């Protein structure tokens, strides 16, 4: 009892001290609970809701591009891609190396890919899978699916790629898509969605707004692993709209097939009245899907070093000296300014001497006395030297702009360049006085004169109609047809236009005409045109005097061959421009292509009227 | 104890002490209030596990089975004479120590630490056994020690070694949380046994000096836990994730809770280890502040009842054992709840009776059996027979 008593007392005292501590700590827990659940309860309730509901943007399917008859020019196709779940989910791999090794046996990865994958695995964010390989073939996908048990963490899912059924045939016009740039993502954060593509060129870029659609949103209840429990709300968004073009895929294919026989060429064919671009081609071309599916450095380098510039849309942005195709401009400038009259005749001895310099006609033997239609027909240089001198460069430049040369073309796709016609003012601004000799050579489309094939087509269309025709690529966006513009009159007297058209008609149909070989014999399709041949290197005086044959030059130094035309003469329906780089002579290289194009265009009309006739009422 | 009343009571020191108990008497002396508390808490645990999945499978069913086994074990132990248990104290301690060594040698690795030992196909956590065995061993050591003897530092060296040996072994697993709990159990038992205040002051100073050195020797994940506890936003999807998600689940319970089966956070797997260490968050989200306080109150009642049993025992062994078992339970509850509420760093400590798990539940039930046995045999005579009456 003696030792029990103090011991019991000590125990009781100390047990009570500790019990007080225990109760105190329980009280602390209660206070903490009050703080978390009552005082801050509302705050945590919001956090809980955020946890539970995850809003995900849905990438809308990109709109299709159709030709005038509804043929698919650009669409979407699903493709398989292989992803590796590295962590965060129950089906994630625990041994990424082993899975990669098995994957490599089925779908061989090259060294660069392996390096990228290893880097991404090391730097990956939780719950975000690592992309192993995009664009799996059917066989690869099947092989991966069959071997799934040996590939822990591997997921094969579906993405979409842009599909271009016509491939290279209209790559420049349609353009291509690619991942958005960082600046684009900053401007529109929606573009950060994986797999989103934006138009980078051509119609894909020009009509990106309509094609892109509006992203949808789905509100999902998710668990901590990001696994979807159920859909709470779903707004599918708006798929991109279909853009229907004026282009005729069949005509385009024929144009490209014919152009492909030249090393580097381009052509534009417009339907007058609406300004519809029925064909616009530039060869050689490129495969537009490569920009979406991944471009090899080798392919890029090949494109960049190719002298024929396959990536450049030469129809829209190829800049050439117009050569003799410019003569209708000089003629109309002369007529409207009074420099010449419809009855003016000049004598061509084969040259013009001016200020101690002799300016040769291409026909060194001379054409003799010529009126305007004959001068256009035979493409006499001396006649237009005189016309230019009588008109002045500023008036010529003004007429060129009126006919669509040297002003940015009004066209509904990006990338069109504009040509150039100099003025005295411009020359002065560059510190030099304009000389008459310069006026002489600019009258026949040499010197500083520059045009694009599209501008040449616009010029031909305007000469053919007297209206300020501009090209139109898109016909309809979604269900609504784009309004057709009534192109205003150019204000050039019809009689003047008639004389120029007469000259162009003779150039093709008169046996003396430069393009007689390319005439269309069917009177209903009678074609009027103008050849052009523009030197790309300066010939020495001696060479020029000796009537040097430029056909003997190496390809890249030969003159460019150009041709503009419209048809039928009686009531023009189509206008075209063809440029064959280093084709030597317009009559020889470009006009035959225009002939094929015109025939195809008339064939297109026949085909569509047959379709209309055959359609049930 | 002041002496009141007549000669009969005066003689209680010897005469009323009993050496044998009959069965009906034992049943009558079982603390049925405590038993009811245990059943109630076990039920809350099973309900929480049921709500985790919305089905009896896989957790609730197995937990109910374990509760039944544990309950039977508790009552069975309650009938075992406390003197037999006292005799088994050191052998149990020795077995637990051997098991701890075996964990380090052959244990299986769970979540980066060796904590489990497979015995006959059943995974056991020897550190759980050690907590109870240590209480028994220390109580046995101090059962007859006089106030003066306890003042002698050399008398304290063997029990001190008995504490530090398992602490070091558990630290090596490594399981910092359990090691600290074992250390705290030892310290509070020393305190209750009457070890002088200055010893604790000395230990405290030495510990304070050793802490920085100890931190330098902690494992990377242990340091990370302490650092993320200080700033959970450091790594919201990594180590800080548990703390943030636990607080969100708790807080979204609000005053009245989301209602049974409406725990969005728990059901949607945002809660890590929701059926084991973080089960309280699951309960609190569904039953709110009111339910949580009620549950904490029930847990507090268990601790208080254990304290009352300790005070009612008439032998030092029973007092220290009952007190130690209550303290063990309290430390579990407090460390788990404080961890879940973001008050202390996260360490793998389950909530006894509620969390899913066999080892901890059975050990808790067994310790409660001993606790009940203390009260049933409160009057047991611990006088050595050889010394005579």
Image (spheres, coloured by chain):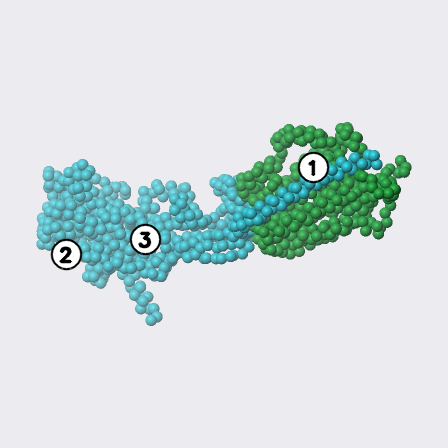
Chain colours: A cyan, B green
Which residue is depicted at the point 80% across and 49% down? B29
The chain identifier of the residue carrying mark 2 reads: A
Residue B89 lies, with reference to residue A149, above or below; the image says above
Left or right, residue B6 beside residue A446:
right
Q: Which residue is mark 2?
A: A493
Measure the C-alpha gap from mark 1 to mark 2. Answer: 110 Å
Q: Is residue B59 visible?
A: no
Query: In x, y percent, where is residue B272?
Result: 60, 47
Task: Establish whether labels 2 and 3 are both on one chain.
Answer: yes
Tag 1 subunit = B
Quadrant location, the N terminus of chain B = top right
**Residue under numbered circle 1:** B184
Task: Determine the residue located farthest toward the bottom in the rendered image.
Answer: A617
Label 3 sits on residue: A256
What percent of the width, then of the height, locates residue A401?
A: 20, 49
Specify few, some or many for label 1: CA neighbours under 10 Å numbering under 14, 14-19, or 20 or more.
Answer: some
Q: Is residue B97 or residue A122 the one in the foreground?
A: B97
Expressed as whole percent of the image width and height from the top left, the position of residue A178 reads: 40, 48
Q: Taking A426 as reference, is A484 above or below it?
A: below
For discs 2 and 3, the disc positioned in front in the rendered view: 2
Alpha carbon of mark 1 to alpha carbon of mark 3: how far? 89 Å
Tell me which corner region of the image, top left, top right, bottom left or bottom right, holds residue A449: top left
* Residue A470 horizontal side relative to residue A130, left or right: left
Q: Secondary structure at mark 3?
A: helix
Residue A427 occupies which quadrant of the picture?
A: top left
């Amino acid at each position: 009892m003696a030792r029990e008593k103090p011991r019991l007392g000590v125990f009781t005292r100390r047990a009570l001290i500790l019990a007080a501590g225990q109760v105190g700590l329980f009280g602390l827990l209660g206070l903490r609970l009050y703080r978390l659940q009552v005082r801050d309860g509302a705050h945590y309730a919001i956090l809980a809701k955020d946890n539970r509901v995850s809003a995900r943007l849905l990438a809308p399917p990109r709109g299709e591009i159709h030709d005038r008859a509804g043929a698919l020019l650009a669409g979407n196709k699903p493709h398989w891609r292989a992803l590796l779940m590295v962590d965060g989910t129950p089906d994630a791999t625990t041994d990424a190396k082993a899975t990669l090794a098995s994957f490599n046996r089925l779908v061989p990865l090259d060294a660069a890919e392996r390096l990228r994958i290893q880097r991404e695995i090391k730097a990956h964010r939780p719950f975000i899978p690592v992309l192993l390989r995009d664009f799996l073939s059917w066989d690869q996908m099947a092989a991966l699916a069959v071997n799934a048990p040996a590939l822990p963490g591997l997921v094969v899912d579906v993405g979409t790629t842009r599909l271009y059924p016509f491939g290279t045939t209209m790559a420049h016009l349609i353009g291509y898509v690619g991942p958005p740039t960082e600046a684009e993502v900053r401007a529109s954060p929606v573009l950060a969605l994986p797999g989103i593509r934006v138009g980078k060129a051509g119609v894909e870029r020009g009509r990106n707004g309509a094609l892109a659609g509006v992203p949808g949103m789905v509100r999902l209840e998710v668990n901590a692993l990001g696994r979807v429990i159920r859909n709470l709300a779903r707004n599918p968004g708006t798929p991109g709209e279909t853009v229907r073009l004026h282009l005729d895929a069949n005509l385009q294919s024929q144009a490209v097939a014919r152009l492909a026989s030249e090393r580097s060429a381009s052509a534009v064919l417009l339907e007058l009245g609406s300004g519809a671009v029925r064909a616009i081609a530039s060869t050689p071309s490129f495969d537009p899907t490569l920009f979406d599916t991944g471009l090899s450095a080798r392919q890029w380098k090949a494109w960049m070093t190719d002298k024929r510039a396959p990536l450049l849309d030469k129809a829209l942005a190829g800049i050439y000296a117009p050569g003799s195709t410019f003569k209708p401009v000089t003629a109309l400038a002369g007529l409207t300014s009074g420099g010449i009259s419809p009855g003016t005749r000049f004598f061509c001895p084969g040259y013009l001497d001016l200020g101690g310099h002799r300016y040769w006609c291409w026909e060194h033997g001379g054409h003799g006395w010529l009126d305007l239609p004959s001068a256009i027909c035979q493409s006499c240089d001396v006649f237009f030297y005189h016309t230019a001198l009588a008109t002045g460069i500023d008036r010529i430049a003004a007429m060129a702009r009126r006919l669509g040369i040297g002003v940015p073309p009004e066209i509904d796709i990006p990338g069109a360049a504009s040509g150039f016609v100099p003025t005295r003012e411009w020359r002065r601004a560059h510190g030099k006085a304009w000389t008459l000799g310069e006026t002489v050579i600019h009258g026949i489309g040499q010197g500083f004169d520059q045009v694009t094939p599209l501008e040449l087509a616009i010029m031909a269309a305007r000469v053919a109609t007297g209206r300020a025709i501009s090209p139109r690529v898109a016909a309809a966006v979604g269900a609504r047809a784009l309004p057709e513009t009534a192109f205003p009159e150019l204000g050039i007297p019809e009689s003047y236009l008639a004389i120029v058209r007469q000259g162009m008609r003779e150039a093709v149909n008169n046996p003396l005409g430069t393009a007689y070989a390319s005439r269309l014999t069917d009177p209903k399709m009678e074609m009027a045109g103008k050849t052009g041949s523009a030197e790309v290197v300066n010939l020495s005086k001696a060479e020029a005097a000796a009537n040097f044959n430029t056909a003997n030059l190496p390809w890249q130094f030969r003159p460019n061959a150009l041709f503009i035309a419209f048809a039928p003469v009686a009531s023009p329906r189509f206008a075209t421009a063809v440029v064959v780089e280093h084709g030597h002579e317009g009559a020889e290289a470009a006009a035959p292509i225009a002939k094929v194009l015109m025939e195809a265009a008339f064939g297109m009309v026949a085909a569509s009227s047959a379709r209309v006739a055959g359609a049930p009422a | 104890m002041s002496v009141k009343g007549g000669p009969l009571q005066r003689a209680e020191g010897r005469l009323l002490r009993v050496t044998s108990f009959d069965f009906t008497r034992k049943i009558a002396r079982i603390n049925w209030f405590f038993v009811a508390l245990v059943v109630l808490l076990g039920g809350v645990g099973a309900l929480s596990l049921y709500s985790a999945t919305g089905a009896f499978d896989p957790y609730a069913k197995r937990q109910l089975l374990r509760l039944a086994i544990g309950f039977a074990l508790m009552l069975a132990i309650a009938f075992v004479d406390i003197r037999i248990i006292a005799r088994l104290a050191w052998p149990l301690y020795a077995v637990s120590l051997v098991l701890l060594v075996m964990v380090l040698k052959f244990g299986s690795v769970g979540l980066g630490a060796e904590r489990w030992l497979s015995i006959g196909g059943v995974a056991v956590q020897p550190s759980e056994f050690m907590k109870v065995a240590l209480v028994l061993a220390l109580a046995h050591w101090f059962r007859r020690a006089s106030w003066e003897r306890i003042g002698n530092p050399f008398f304290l060296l063997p029990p001190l070694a008995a504490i530090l040996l398992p602490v070091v072994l558990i630290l090596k697993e490594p399981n910092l949380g359990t090691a600290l709990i074992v250390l705290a159990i030892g310290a509070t038992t020393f305190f209750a046994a009457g070890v002088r205040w200055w010893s604790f002051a000395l230990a405290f100073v030495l510990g304070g000096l050793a802490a920085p050195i100890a931190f330098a020797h902690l494992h990377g994940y242990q340091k990370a836990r302490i650092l993320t506890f200080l700033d959970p936003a450091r790594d919201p999807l990594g180590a800080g994730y548990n703390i943030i998600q636990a607080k969100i689940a708790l807080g979204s319970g609000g005053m009245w809770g989301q209602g049974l089966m409406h725990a969005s956070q728990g059901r949607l797997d945002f809660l890590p280890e929701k059926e084991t260490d973080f089960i309280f968050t699951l309960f609190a989200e569904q039953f709110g502040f009111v339910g949580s306080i009620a549950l904490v109150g029930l847990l507090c009642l268990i601790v208080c009842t254990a304290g009352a049993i300790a005070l009612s025992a008439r032998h030092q062994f029973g007092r220290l054992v009952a007190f130690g078992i209550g303290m063990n339970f309290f430390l579990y509850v407090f460390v788990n709840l404080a961890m879940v509420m973001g008050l202390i760093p996260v360490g793998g400590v389950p909530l006894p009776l509620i969390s899913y798990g066999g080892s901890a539940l059975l050990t808790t039930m067994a310790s409660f059996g001993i606790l009940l046995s203390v009260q049933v045999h409160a009057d047991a005579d611990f006088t050595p027979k050889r010394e005579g009456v």
